[in-house]
Structures are given as structure tokens and as C-alpha cells.
Image (cartoon, rainbow, N blue to C red):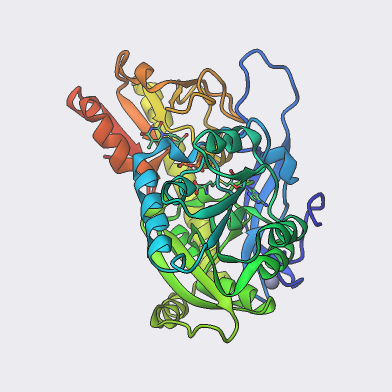
Amino acid sequence: MPQELAIATCGVCDGTVEEFLDLGRQPLSDAFREPDSDADEFFFRLAVGQCESCTMVQLIESVPREKMFHEDYPYHSSGSAVMRAHFASVARRFLDTELTGPDPLIVEMGCNDGVMLSEIHRAGVRHLGFEPSGGVAEAARAKGIRVRTAFFEDSTAAQVRAEEGPAQVVFAANTMCHIPYPDSIFRGVDALLASDGVFVFEDPYLGDVVAKTSFDQIYDEHFFLFSAHSVRAMARRHGFELVDVERLPVHGGEVRYTLARAGRRAPGAAVAALLAEEDARGLSDIDTLRGFADKVIRVRDDLVELLRRLRTDGSRVVAYGATAKSATVTNFCDIGPELVSYVCDSTPAKQHRLTPGKHIPVRPPTAFRDPYPDYALLFAWNHAEEIMANEQEFRRSGGRWISYVPNVRVL
Ligand code: SAH
Ligand code: TYD
Ligand code: ZN
């Protein structure tokens, strides 16, 4: 499987990938560091390009998967109430539609701590999660969910097909875009999926990233940035058709793609509509992506200028949300503890550690109030509503939020 090698050929179709944005030397985005550690940090070159042939937007270099997904993978999906509600509604929809036959089976790749499957489990429906990161897999198991601590790929999927029979649904949220080996995934889905089953995945949408200049959606784990055009091309290579798309508000703008075996289901009107919208926006044109790259540089320059000015003024600035996304921001913009004193985050596995690369201390949200800073840079901008609702007192005390999506401004 292609994991070790940097690629300049497309991960989907073997076409040539043309680079349009270089975000420089970057660490693993979820490698939070013990303060007393003197271990070497892993770095790679984070650059993005587009396949000249199938239009897929992707990283130029991939990071070996075991370096990212392991026992200590710190991201817990259930950390956000909004995301818990989102995935409960995803599960209920499957229960009401695809999972109504006799003894149905749903398989999820990247089930993490069971944020979606817990609802399926509660309904007593047969399910299986694939989760290679041992710590979060164990958190799912503690909720009674059936989980294999393994990567979903051709061999592991075929094994499940042999043991459990066909699945009516294969689902993946924020996981397909993490996987630079889609050939193996599609072989696995082909082996596992019932003849009339659906393969459904939702991931950050290229259209939203370009519209919001949210370049922080680009980091080691986000190998692909999907569009309806590129996903349809990928599906067709593997005997599948894109039959539905839904725009989702979560994580700053995503699309849910529904794939069925070619000829089994007719594509809905939403597919043609999104394809037409992408054409009208020039979303598959390299010039559009180069224009996006120019805006990224502007955001970086504006953000650094603002933070330097606040430091000169003597303002106290911290950040909120030790997101994987923020590794790209801090390392690309060269923002360290001299500009942002610490980052507050509710995830125990990140607290009292240092952010990857720039080594900003991570503290629990209680530190935010003790006392409130003058400014808080919102790294978890995709959870803005939830965080601002929880932290209303900050603004009342005179504090101001700073956002850099879609541009740099004090809120
Ligand atoms: N579905 C959750 C988790 C997303 S994080 C959510 O939307 O919040 C991505 C997860 O995919 C991680 O937990 C990681 O361990 C897992 N993962 C990465 N590669 C995988 C693969 N090949 N098969 C299954 N899971 C994988
Ligand atoms: P998220 O933006 O979901 O993902 P990623 O790491 O892939 O960029 O991460 C949100 C982070 O913000 C996560 O570490 C938890 C933290 N968080 C809080 O500290 N407080 C909150 O109220 C919420 C919703 C999240
Ligand atoms: Zn390609």
C-alpha cells in the first residue's frame, strides 16, 4: 500500500498532481508533546495540489498512517455537543431508511469514541466499527459498541464480509479524507457492501474551504479535499456512482456523499445541482485554487500583524481549541507562546501538553477564566456557537474574540 512515499502522482487515478499551495514544514497535527520531552519531532512538507486528470485536491506528501493513528490519538469526537447531536441524527436517519430489513448491518470506518454508533447500539441494530486508534476504540467499547482496532482496507473488510455477511451501509465521517489509499478502501467496500447497499461519507468540502479561505482544513490527516466532481470521478473508477450529496454545516462546511453500485440507484437532483454550482464557481480550475492560495498568504500576514500589534500594546492573548487545524495555522504563520500565551481545550489528553511544532501550552478551560485574557484567538472556529455560548462571561468581562475565517477580524 502506498504510505511511505511522498507522491507527485494522484492517489486516486495516477494522474499528475500540480501543486498550488505550500504550507511549509509541519509537525503531526495531533502530536501533543509532554513539556519535559526531548524527543525529536516528526516534520513533513505540507503542500497541496490538484490532479490534472481527475481534479482531486490532495497533499503532495503523505504521512505514514501509524504515525497519526495510534494508541494515543487524542481527538475524541464526543467532545462537542453539536457533533453528538449531529451524529445521533445521522444514525436515526440510517435506522429509518437503509436499516429497516431483517437483521441489517452497518459498518463504520473511523468510529472514534462511538459518537455515531452509540445511537445504533442503543437501537439494538447490528454494527461494527473499525478504529485503528486504540485509545478512542476502547472508549467506544466501553459504551458497548462492537469495534475492531484495525484499519479498514481491502483485507480487513473482506474478513468482516466472511464473518458477518453483507452490510447495508458502510459509513465514514471525517475519515475518507484521511485515507491516501482509496483503491484499497473501495475494494473493501465492494467486498463488504450488499448489492443494493450504500457507501456514505462526509468530509470537509473544497467549496467551503475556498469560499472561507479555511486553509487550516489542510493538515497531515486531511489528505484529500473532496468536491462533487472529484468524488464522482473516484466512485466511477471503482464501479460506484455518486447518487446523492448534502451540504452540512458542521466543521465549517462539509458534504455528505452517498455512493451506490453503478446502475443500482438513480442519482438525485442534488448531484447535478452541486456539479453545476462547482462548474459555475470554477472550483475544478487550478486558477481558482491559485487565487485561494493568494488569499491564504493575506490571512497569514493579517493575523501575524494583528497579534504582533496586540503584543506591543501589552494585551493578553490566548487561544481557544487545540485543534489539529491550528497546527497548520501556528506553524505556517510562526505563532508561538510569545504571541499566544496558551490554548484552552476541554480534551484531557491534550491538556498540560504542548501544541505540535510551536509548543504553546494547552490548559483546561478553567484556566480561561483565571483571569480572562483581553483577546481569545478562536482556533476551533467551526465550534464558534457552542464555545461562545459556553463562554459568554468572557465577552461580558470585556474580552474579545479573534477570528481568521474567512478573514482576520476582532469580533
Ligand atoms: N468519525 C469521527 C472521527 C473522525 S477522526 C468523527 O467524525 O468525529 C478520523 C478517525 O479515523 C480517527 O479516529 C482515526 O483513527 C480513524 N482512521 C484513520 N484511518 C482509518 C482507516 N483506514 N480505517 C478506519 N479508521 C481509520
Ligand atoms: P475540532 O475542530 O473538532 O477538530 P480538529 O482537531 O480535527 O481540528 O476540534 C475541536 C477542539 O476544540 C477539540 O480539541 C475540543 C475543543 N473544544 C473545546 O475545548 N471546547 C468546546 O466547547 C468544544 C466544542 C471543543
Ligand atoms: Zn487523479
> In the drawing, does residue 130 fall left or right of residue 38?
left
- Please count the marks in the image: 0
The x, y position of residue 228, in whole percent, is 51, 73
The residue most toward the front is 102
**Front one among 22 and 319:** 319
Please determine whether, in this image, residue 32 is positioned above or below residue 60. Answer: above
From the image, which quarter does the C terminus lie in?
A: top left
**Front one among 229 and 50:** 229
> In the drawing, does residue 326 fall left or right of residue 310?
right
The x, y position of residue 38, in whole percent, is 72, 17
The x, y position of residue 47, in whole percent, is 66, 53
The x, y position of residue 10, in whole percent, is 72, 66
Please determine whether, in this image, residue 264 is positioned above or below residue 124. Answer: below
At horizontal 35% and vertical 20% (from top left) the residue drawn is 368
Image quadrant assignment for residue 286: bottom right
At horizontal 74% and vertical 70% (from top left) the residue drawn is 16
At horizontal 48% and vertical 61% (from top left) the residue drawn is 205
Please determine whether, in this image, residue 195 is positioned above or below residue 212. Answer: below
**Front one among 93 and 343:** 93
The residue most toward the left is 396
Q: Is residue 91 visible?
A: yes
Splitting the image into four quadrants, where does ligand 3 fall? bottom right
**Front one among 212 and 234:** 234
From the image, which quarter does the N terminus lie in?
A: bottom right
Q: Is residue 55 visible?
A: no
> In the drawing, does residue 163 fall left or right of residue 123?
right
> In the drawing, does residue 31 fall left or right of residue 7?
left
